[in-house]
Image (cartoon, rainbow, N blue to C red):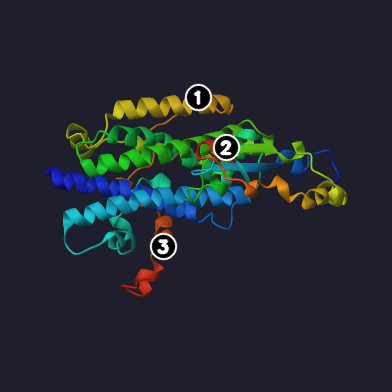
Amino acid sequence: MSDDRQSPKASQLMPLWEVFIRPRTGLAHGHVGSVHASDEVMALQAARDVYTRRGEGVSIWVVPSASITASDPDQRDENFDPSASKIYRHPSFYDIPDDVGHM
Amino acid sequence: MTRRDDLLTLLLRLGDDHLILGHRLSEWCGHAPMLEEDLALPNMALDLIGTARMCYGYAAEIEDDGRTEDDYAFLRDGTEFRHMLMVERPNGDFAFTILRQFLFAAYMHPVWDGLTKAADQRLADHAAKAVKEMAYHIRHGGEWVVRLGDGTEESAGRMLAALDDLGPYLGEMFERDETADRLVAAGLLPDPAVVRAAFDNMVARTFAMAQLPPLDVTTGISGGRAGRHGEVLGHLLAEMQFMQRAYPGLTW
């Protein structure tokens, strides 16, 4: 489009929302994808229609994608490599008592 | 007319309303204005077709003449269909589709709600499922009606045009005849006054939020319950019934 009027862009009218679903058997909401919607109510509906068609969930969260602060891919090495040498942080060397429940 | 005949008439009216509207909705698959609605509209189509299957399956058991649900859907001619004319109208634009869906759900929700206490266990059991589906169709359609009606000049204009196009067909929802009166008396349909009040209340609240004029449901074009349909039904059936007509008895 060459016409550059001040009409809002599609990305402003229908911004992106990140969708999180809590599965029937799960305890936490997990990220499943994203939808376009004009506002949070429509985003919840779109998320329901797109991501729960096969009985995937019992609860939905939607968050404006613009609200997410992401780590810098350029800092990946310094962020994540130092943990690679600390295998003792994995609780695989211990017996977990039954009454601890979910770890 | 026996109770059996009336129940059959009811199952065909309900089944045909849901099948034909379900087919109309399914026509959006791959054509909706955005991916989210491309999934939402066929989702709802499947809800409606599920109800049609229950109705035809039950009718087939009652008639017990060897026909199955597929015969009712795919081997009847237009004059044998008993749906309201509003459900066979072409989809038009997204505003028309959404408005029709909202109004149909606003009407069917109290019908199914009443039928959860129907004097027929099969109907009552299905009603418990259908009432939840209609609640979601109302929410989905209602939110869109509000955003289109109270949206831009373009979207509001399309909503008003949709109201004009659909208006003459709305009266058929509340038409009464002797069969319907007997069904109410037999506990196989809810009190029409209760249905009408719930419909009016839902529509009034939504239209007020949508900045749309109050809905005026007057007697208009009718005849669907008697099998008098528009030319558009022939085209719909030609597409929907093609496989069974061209390859009789074809199965998956």
Label 2, residues with CA under 10 Å away: few <14, some 14-19, many ≥20 = many
Q: Amino acid at mark 1?
A: Arg
Q: Residues within 10 Å of mark 1 (few under 14, many from 20)?
A: few
Kindly state the secondary structure of the residue where label 2 is placed: helix
Q: Please report whichever mark, 2 or 1, sits nearer to the chain's N-terminal start.
A: 2
Residue placed at 32% from the left, 73% from the top?
Answer: B248
Tell me the crowding category of disc 3: few under 14, some 14 to 19, or many 20 or more residues within 10 angstroms, Cα based. Answer: some
Q: Eyeballing the image, is A39 above or below B78?
A: above
Evaluate whether residue B88 shows in this view.
no
* Percent coordinates x, y for residue A11 in the rendering: 75, 43
The front one of B98 and A29 is: A29
Per the model, the C-alpha gap separating discs 3 and 2 is 28 Å
- Three-letter amino acid code of the residue under disc 2: Trp
Residue A39 image offset from top left, x and y in percent = 66, 35
Task: Measure the C-alpha gap from mark 3 to mark 1.
Answer: 36 Å
Q: Quadrant of the N terminus of chain B?
A: top left
Q: Which residue is mark 1?
A: B205
Asked whether, in this view, residue B101 is left or right of residue B4, the answer is right
Residue lying farthest bottom?
B247
Element type at marker 1?
A: helix
Alpha carbon of mark 2 to alpha carbon of mark 1: how far?
14 Å
Q: Earlier in the sequence, mark 3 or mark 2?
A: 2
Task: Look at mark 3 in the image and give the residue it sits on.
Answer: B240
Same chain shared by disc 2 and disc 1 = yes
Residue at mark 2: chain = B
- Identified at 59% across, 26% down, the residue is B211
Is label 3 or label 2 in front? 2
Question: Residue B144 shows which numbered tag?
Answer: 2
Q: Quadrant of residue B68?
A: bottom left
Amino acid tagged 3: Met
